[in-house]
Amino acid sequence: MNPDMKTLALACREAAVAIAALGPAAKRDLLLDMAARIEANAAGILDANAVDLRRAEGSGISAALFDRLRLDPARIAGIAHGLREVAGLPDPVGQVTHRDTRPNGVLVERVRVPLGVIAMIYEARPNVTVDAAALCLKAGNGVILRGGSEAIHSNRALAALLGDALAAAGLPRAALTLVEDLRRETMVELLQLTDIIDLAIPRGGEGLIRFVAEHARVPVIKHYKGVCHLYVDKDADIDIALGLLIDGKTTRPSACNSLETLLVHEDIAGEFLARAAVLLETHHVEMRGCERTRALVPTAHAASEADYAAEFLDLIIAIRVVDDLDAAIAHIRRYGSDHTEVIATGDDAAARRFVDSLRSAVVMVNASSRFSDGGELGLGAEIGISTTRLHAYGPMGLEALTIERYVLHGNGQIRHPSSQGRVGPG
């Protein structure tokens, strides 16, 4: 065990006690100060990010990862805005989610409390450094941030500013700990600190997430990939469906909530695909389709089985013409990743069956897959998306970083009144 890693984690656990003791106003003011510091130091953050981008250009990094790594003034403004949004959210800590008075007069409450120490392991996205810090601290937790080597300069710059805000508030910097030893063996050591780390959240490519899941001895929230589907039903409004397709596929293809597969009912396929192909080609989207798709769209390439299970994270989409709603559901059950599914339809019964038949974390009716995001769902900044059926499922916000415990209030009740006055087993 690397004593340095364990020492860092122990310091974070100790600092988390101070964070858990903060009231809502103090946490709000802390996050607002962090937002102000990021805005005031935008130039320095961009300089640090430029170093990372220069290093990434020669490393063979994918276009999707490069896009996630890149910061610009608008994205920095968005990071600060996200901090302010989280600052303004209701504080979940201390929230009573259930209250019941038992027949014996004992009041039983279920109350939200912080998880403790959260290890956040991520690739390429400097914004995650801030999003994770904001959500973990607001929920009363300490956080250990282990970003990727490709973003180390950006992450250092951001973490230093967040640490300055903690120090200015009289709080220990260790509550937000950035791991700078980026060897994989150090990551494994972190993931095996069962008495210190309460939850690990990996965020990145499938390879990273599987590595974390395979080596962790602590609980892990994960989703391996986002194979998101749009099914265009025979009763769909074609204009609405086209809007969902283009927004879901082209606005940010590197995002895990972007569309990867288009399923079209055979009754509407001719008209819909003729118009869809023109729009997709205009946006430089490569189409890979089944035989029926290629008969209608000659410019489409042949799709393989692997294409239907792929998370392209690029301007590529797999297309299949299906017999009916049941065939679309069967396809999603076979190839989906339990992330996000969309149906375009004017038939309420079809929409209900689509929703009820799938177990994905987010299911949408006539709305873009790009809304599968914590901010868009009212959670504030998002710390990740879970397709693991633990205490959190789907986009994770503040409540997912707390747990519920029982608090009982009595006035002397005992469970076995007959035991009063008895000493020992006699």
Image: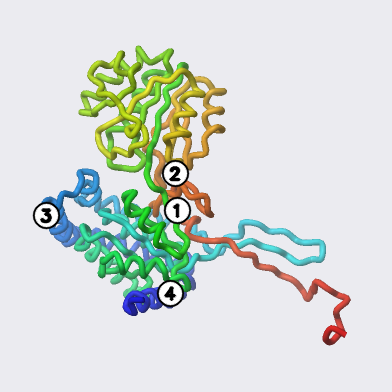
* Residue type, mark 3 in image: Arg
Circle 4 is placed at which residue position? 13
Between the C-alphas of marks 1 and 2, the distance is: 9 Å
Query: Going from the N terminus, do you reach mark 1 or mark 2 first?
Result: 2
- For marks 1 and 4, give the one nearer the viewer: 4
Q: How are the residues colored?
A: rainbow
Query: Going from the N terminus, do you reach mark 4 or mark 2 first?
Result: 4
Query: Going from the N terminus, do you reach mark 1 or mark 4 first?
Result: 4
Q: Residue at x 49, y 28 (%)?
A: 329
| Above or below, 264 relative to 72 | above
The location of residue 51, given as percent across then percent down, is 13, 59
Helix, strand or loop under label 4: helix
User: Could you tell whether 114 is left or right of 64 in the image?
Assistant: right
Q: What is the number of the mark on residue 72?
A: none
Q: What is the number of the mark on residue 397?
A: 1
* Residue type, mark 4 in image: Arg
Q: Residue furthest bottom?
A: 423
- Residue 193: image quadrant is bottom left
- For marks 4 and 2, give the one nearer the viewer: 4
- For marks 3 and 1, give the one nearer the viewer: 3
Q: What is the number of the mark on residue 54?
A: 3
Between the C-alphas of marks 4 and 2, the distance is: 30 Å
Helix, strand or loop under label 1: loop
Q: Are marks 1 and 2 in contact (CB under 8 Å)?
A: yes
Q: Residue at x 22, y 46 (%)?
A: 67
